[in-house]
Amino acid sequence: MTSANWSEPAGGGPADTVGLIGLGPMGAPIAGHIADAGYRLRVWNRTRETAEQLRPHAEVADGVERLSSRVILSALPDIDHLDRLTPSSVLEQWQHDGTARLIVLSTTSPDKVRALAARVAPFDITVVDAAMSGGDAGATAGTLSLMVGADRETFGDLLPLLRTFATTIENMGPLGTGAAAKLCNQLVVAGTLVSLAEALHLARKSGLSDSQLARVLKGGLASSAVLDLKADKLLGRTYELGGSAVNQLKDLRYAVALGDDVGARLPLARESAALFEEAVNQGLGGHDHAVIQEVLEAPQLHHTNQNRISSP
């Protein structure tokens, strides 16, 4: 496989096709960008009706085993979901039909990426972790940031494909480094959300206009992409789903576990995880992660314990 092969619209067989599994808020727009770039696309989603919406731009696979393509991208929430869908019988079919690479776009742990790679290696399938950041807005715009873990040759081969839906693409190093980089990213996202929630909470308690404060923050050093994307949710206290609170908690648990493994002190990550755990325990896990401010606005059970973060 060469980069040139991926710079042109693909051909007709399984070995000339891009597959994508998972058509949620991130996967669906990514699939659209890949198809728009001229690649032949094959998709699978647990809810078939969602996949059918991509016709005639993509072929809809009848089952995961029929997703066989030269490269398959997984836009599922975590590797656990992918593991359940890919027993040996599926991997055998993928191998038979010429699938060579499996790109994991999920936010997960380096250990799980490496375990997946070891499991699929006997089927001649290479795993690449390409954790994505930018949220559903970035996926829709095709401006995601990708943190990739791959050898140099594989990264070069896949770069034209990745550029169809991402604008910032960094090869962080060998397998697993993309996942680690994404966990660093998630510390910033979660910490910023918690800080914004606290700032707006303090403003309201102090008799200030929260919308006026948000405008001031946007104009100064406290401005951020998180504030730009989440201000309407925070100010309106409406939390239609983007990135969920339960997934934010998952990511923070992975980050804390990685910190423990490598000896990194992460006090803010532990406190943020405790707050998101409280939100999930209050039944708010399915809402956008900006819902964290409701833990502050209506505190019920908040007793901080930085050591009580459960393992992922």
Image (spheres, rainbow, N blue to C red):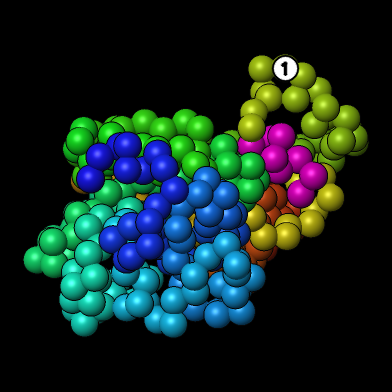
Is residue 132 visible in the rendered structure shown here?
A: yes
Along the viewing direction, whichever of 285 and 271 lies nearer the viewer: 285
Q: Is residue 188 left or right of residue 219?
A: left
Magenta stretch encompasses residue 6: no
Query: Residue 278 vs residue 8: left or right?
Result: right
Up-down relation of residue 146 to residue 285 (above or below): above
**Residue displayed at 58% across by 42% down:** 142
The quadrant holding residue 18 is bottom left
Q: Is residue 36 shown above or below 247?
A: above
Mark 1 lies on a secondary structure that is loop
**Image vertical order of residue 285 relative to residue 161, above or below:** below
206 to the left or right of 155: right
Image quarter (top left, top right, bottom left or bottom right) of the N terminus? top left
Nearest the viewer among 211 and 169 is: 169
Location of residue 152 in the rendering, given as x and y in whole percent from the top left corner: 21, 33
- Seen at 21% across and 82% down, the residue is 89
Predominant SS along the magenta part? helix
Write the start and end of the magenta stretch as one range. Answer: 226-233
Instruction: Identify the residue position indicated by label 1 in the image.
Output: 220
Residue 131: x and y, percent?
40, 46
**Looking at the image, which residue is at 38% across and 56% down?**
11
Residue situated in front as seen by the camera: 256 or 5 = 5
